[in-house]
Image (spheres, rainbow, N blue to C red):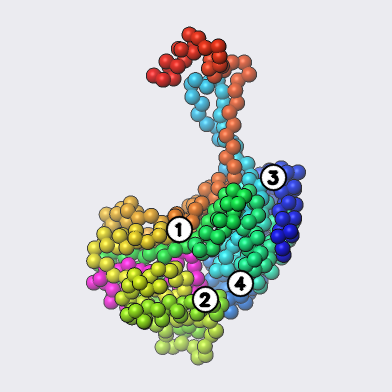
Amino acid sequence: MDTQDLTARLAAQRAAFEREGAPPHAERTRQLLSLKQAVLARRAGLADAVAADFGHRTAYETLLLEIVPVVHGVDYLRRHLRRWMRPERRRVAVHFQPGRAQVIYQPLGVVGIISPWNYPLSLALMPLATAIAAGNRVMLKPSELTPATNAVLADVLRGVFTEEQVAVVSGGVEVGRAFAALPFDHLVFTGSTEVGRHVMRAASEHLVPVMLELGGKSPAIVQQGIPLAGPAASIAFGKLVNAGQTCIAPDYALVHEADVAPFVAAYTAAVRRLYPGGTADPAYSSIINARHCERLSALLEDARSKGAEIREIDSPTRHPGVRARTLPPTVVLRTTPDMTISQQEIFGPILPVVSYRELDDAIAYVNARPHPLALYLFCRDGGVRRAVLERTRSGNVTINDTLMHFGQDDLPFGGVGASGMGAYHGREGFLALSHARGVFEESPRWSTSRLTHPPFGRLTDALLRYLLR
């Protein structure tokens, strides 16, 4: 697909939007319900397609981490949409009385969505559903790394929407570049920070507002002296689900120096409970492609060459045979700032464990790096909780667990700084993909503002004394 085709699709959607106007509440909720029903009806085929693209990913992960959030997210949008769409009365100052002020929420028009490969269903469908709830039309560009999933997803969407409502665009890097440069009314991108810079640069040519959902090195801080079995189990789940290919996975653990050895032991035990079959366990996912496998192996080799201790975790009862593109869960100790693994988002089943002496040291370590998309804190002390929340910045926070903030429909989901901008969950998502149009209505009979018109005189002087008191 070339730039001319993309431009024609955008023009067709924009013309349809101008012709038909904003869809009413009933039409939006009907579309959302149809989307939910179509996803549920095709869930087995969607899970099979995701597994085919990854080489191996259990259907349980796809159903629990992609289909369930989409189904519940759509239900949430449908439940609250009528209230969100209502005009909001706003205060009018006394010197503008008897005027009336309100905010009406209108669709932006055509929203472009560039979705990633790691969760190719939920990270495409939830921004899409939010855009539909706000009354927009959508052009969706999924990742070229998940062709089987994209084919089924496009078929699902064709059964719900016309091309003038939702169009799916296929293609590689060049198509992605052309897509990002289109004059959308809003552009949503989920992916790496580096690609996000290119997307924002391309969108700036047409002053397209951009929502960026990026990533970063999300820390998991473990309070000194607390029982470690629970935190280790939660961090193991968050790190290893989808083989670590999760934008909000805990990137590294910050553990008190006295607790490092028992934490590593607890983490190892937790990993073996989660995946008793080791790297051949049916629940353990493959890495998306050979290039990403090589990147992860290079991170480990660089760390090893600079003095880190590398500990692979596997089960003594592992199944025979080797699954393609599968890396074992790995702990990395004694990392240093010059190691690539300390600088880049890992995006794989590798957990550096970084020691600290005082809580201030852990907070300083986090703050010395770009703001992450997520932060995890395991603590039993209110003072520790307050200190970390008040003195760090991140997209979202989960306390005493990992990943769970993503599943909260009523919380905004988004980054800050290098981890992104904007949010598309909750009411904040509806607002982000709507135009909040302020409307002031003057009384046709009388207005105090007419006292500001020339010719000026005593009434103007009295008004100024009042306004400048």
| Helix, strand or loop under label 3 | loop
Tell me the residue that label 1 is attached to.
418
Residue beneath the point at 66% across and 64% down? 175
Q: Quadrant of the C terminus?
A: top left
Name which residue type carries label 3: Pro
Q: Amino acid at mark 1?
A: Ala
Looking at the image, tell me whether mark 4 or mark 1 is earlier in sequence order: 4
- Determine the secondary structure under disc 2: helix
Residue 23, label in figure: 3
Task: Say which label, 4 or 3, has the lower sequence index.
Answer: 3
Residue found 28% across the figure and 73% down from its top = 260
Magenta stretch: give its range.
239-265
The amino acid pointed to by label 4 is Leu
Q: Would you name the residue on which mark 4 appears? A: 145
Q: Quadrant of the N terminus?
A: bottom right
In which quarter of the view is residue 361 placed?
bottom left
Judge left or right: residue 357 versus residue 131: left
Residue 176 in picture, x, y percent from top left: 63, 63
Binning the other alpha carbons within 10 Å of mark 2 as few (below 14), some (14 to 19) or many (20 upward) gives: some
State which quadrant residue 53 falls in: bottom right
Q: CA distance from mark 4 to mark 1?
A: 24 Å
